[in-house]
Image (cartoon, helix red, strand yellow):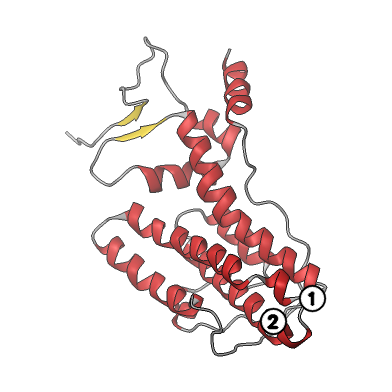
Amino acid sequence: VFGHPWVLVNKNKMSKSTGNVMYTDDIIKHFGVDTLRYYVLHEIPYAQDGNITYELLIERNNTDLANTIGNLVNRTIGMVHKYRDGVVKKVILDEPFELSLKEKALNALPEMTNYMDSLRVSDALEEVVKLARFANKYIDVSEPWVLNKDSEKQDVLDHVLYQLLETIRFVGILLQPFIPQTAQKILDQIGSRDTSFESLAEFGKYEAQTLDKPYVLFERFDMNKKIEEILKDES
């Protein structure tokens, strides 16, 4: 007999008689494959019961996927177009700000490997999200919009944009085992072709190039409207 923990709906076992069954096809229809993959891998720890609801799916989609990862990619490529007409320059300076994206990015894969070795998949995935959060914080600290107005800080602006794109390369590659479709979209948007984990041994491999305009990776859902849409579809 193969026994394993349960996937619970609102902390209760699924049952057709109580009408709390969630079907994979329905979830994918409303959220897509990668949002479901992300939720299950990030929110359901190994060897423990997991809990899922549509509300929790929406919350995780909006916070981690849309606001953190999606926003980082869209915001960075948008700034490259706004300040550099889409042209990326490979400029690496001694870090002028107190946050080091290089250090954070290089530590991500070793940390993930340690977690995966002990089957802590959720913690491993969280390392990628932490890196994306850190990159968003780097934008707030470096203030590229201020640098753009200073003629003497143009090299610093190029450095900031490059640091962000190289970090996004790390994020895209690290996400491949978890949400592969999104990972490929990220790497395609920044024009990164080397998708190997071996390429993460060095920070600064991203090449200068011209980028296309960004597109949205994850839609931000209005909680009430999305739940209403799902209930209407199920009725």
**Is residue 145 depicted above or below 22 in this figure?**
below
Nearer to the camera, 207 or 127:
127
Q: Position of residue 175 (x, y in %)?
A: 49, 60
**Going by the image, does 138 lie left or right of 158?**
left
- Quadrant (top left/top right/bottom left/bottom right) for the N terminus: top left
> How far from the left and from the top, in percent, is residue 109?
39, 71
Work out whether 177 lies above or below 107. Answer: above
Residue 172 in view in this figure: no
Residue carrying label 1? 84
Q: Is residue 15 left or right of residue 203?
A: left
Identify whether 231 is placed above or below 138.
above
Q: Which element is circle 1 on?
A: helix
Q: How many C-alpha atoms fall within 10 Å of the one at disc 2: few (<14), some, or many (≥20)?
A: many
| 102, 43: nearer the viewer | 102
Q: Report the residue marked by disc 2.
A: 158
Cβ atoms under marks 1 and 2 closer than 8 Å = yes
Image: 192 above or below 177: below
Q: CA distance from mark 1 to mark 2?
A: 9 Å
Secondary structure of residue under mark 2: helix
Residue 153: image tag: none
Position of residue 215 measured from the top left corner of the image (x, y, whole percent): 72, 55
Specify which label sits upstream in the sequence, 1 or 2: 1
